[in-house]
Structures are given as C-alpha cells and as structure tokens.
Image (tube, rainbow, N blue to C red):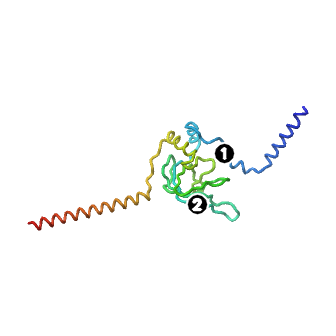
Amino acid sequence: MRFVMPVVAAFCAAAALFHAGPQQAFACTCGGSPPSDDELMRARLASSDRALLVAIVEGPVEAKLIGDGRYATPAGAFFRAERVYRGDVPARFEMGYITCTKVPEFERGRRWLVEMTQFGGRWQTDLCSITTEVGSRQGQRYIPSLDRVLGKPPLLPNDDGDASMLTVALVVAGLGAAAGVSAYVARRSQREHHS
C-alpha cells in the first residue's frame, strides 16, 4: 500500500499539469485517422457532405488581418477545378486553409485533392479534411480509392486552353477557306481564258 499511494499521487499531479497546460494543441488534432482503404474511404465520405475535387493551383492568397491580430480570411490559394468527384463548384475559386499549424505551400501549377465547404461565402478547407497534394503519399493512396468508390470523374475543359484551341481552329478554317476561294477563282479564270 505504501508503494501505491505515491504512484497515485504522481499520476494525479501529472493529470493536473496536463490539463493546466495550453489547450491550443487540441484544436490541431482530428478525431479518427485518415482513410487508408476503400471501406474507410466509403465511411469517411458518408460522414461528410463537402465538395471533393482535384484542382490546380493558379496562385497563392495571403491571409488578411483584422486590426486586433485576428485573421479576416485565412491564407490559401486560387484554384482551377480539374476533376470534380462531388459538389457544385465553380471552374475557378478561392479557397482558404484553416489551421493552427503551417499552411501548405500551394505552389502554382501543382495539383491538389481538395475537400472543402462554403463558409461565410468563401470556400474553406482545414487540417481534418481530405486535402493533400496529388503527388504526395496520401494523394497517391486517396485518388485510386476515390476512383473505385465514387468513379473517376472526367477532366473538365480548361477554358484557357479551349480559348486558344478555338483561336487556332478559326485561323486554320479561315486559311482553308481563303485557299479554297483562291483555287476556285484561279480555275474560273483559267476556264474563261481558254474559252
């Protein structure tokens, strides 16, 4: 009994110190673990109604501060949607990343798997969402699982690329039409000259 009392006292003291310490660390943890197989992915998707897509970073968004040191908008990035697994999302959007740790580096041209929701008229994601760079280990595990569970969505048209392709198509069509008219005029002129 003499041995048990100091152990119980030490345990109680440790518990008191643990609860008296800073609580912010709890805000940086998520319940459960990330989905690691198709069944866990199915369960994870069933518990969320967030939009889920693959998007390409078009540029960073800096966090905007309010006067008292709080953030009016979190740091994030501008994105262009590439494939949409679910949700009604625009072709281009701004997304903020809510976290108490370092915001991911959203480098221009990189592809991200993004799970997001609208909050206060703005798309946002957080530490607990399925948001990861496509080329990362998580991304390489999540994407095939999502393709199996939800089906692989088609690529969305890239309106920038489509605009330039349309320009090329119109130029080619115009040149073809001009060549056709020129050939017709030359044949007609040749016939009139021989008659």
Residue found 63% across the figure and 54% down from its top: 98
Viewer-side residue, 99 vs 57: 57
Three-letter code for the amino acid on which mark 2 is drawn = Val
Q: Quadrant of the image for the C terminus? A: bottom left
Residue 18 horizontal/vertical position (percent): 79, 46
Residue found 44% across the figure and 47% down from its top: 154
Residue found 90% across the figure and 31% down from its top: 1
Residue 107 located left or right of residue 26:
left
Classify residue 5 by image quadrant. top right
Three-letter code for the amino acid on which mark 1 is drawn = Cys
The disc label shown at residue 61, or none: 2
Label 2 environment density (alpha carbons within 10 Å; few <14, some 14–19, many ≥20): some
Name the element at disc 2: strand
Residue found 52% across the figure and 44% down from its top: 143
Residue 81 horizontal/vertical position (percent): 50, 53
Residue under label 1: 30
Residue 10 horizontal/vertical position (percent): 85, 40
Residue 163 horizontal/vertical position (percent): 40, 60
* Mark pair 2, 1: CA separation: 25 Å
Residue 162 located left or right of residue 77:
left
Classify residue 96 by image quadrant. bottom right
Looking at the image, residue 62 lies above or below residue 114: below
Residue 51 appearing in the image: no
Label 1 environment density (alpha carbons within 10 Å; few <14, some 14–19, many ≥20): few
Name the element at disc 1: loop
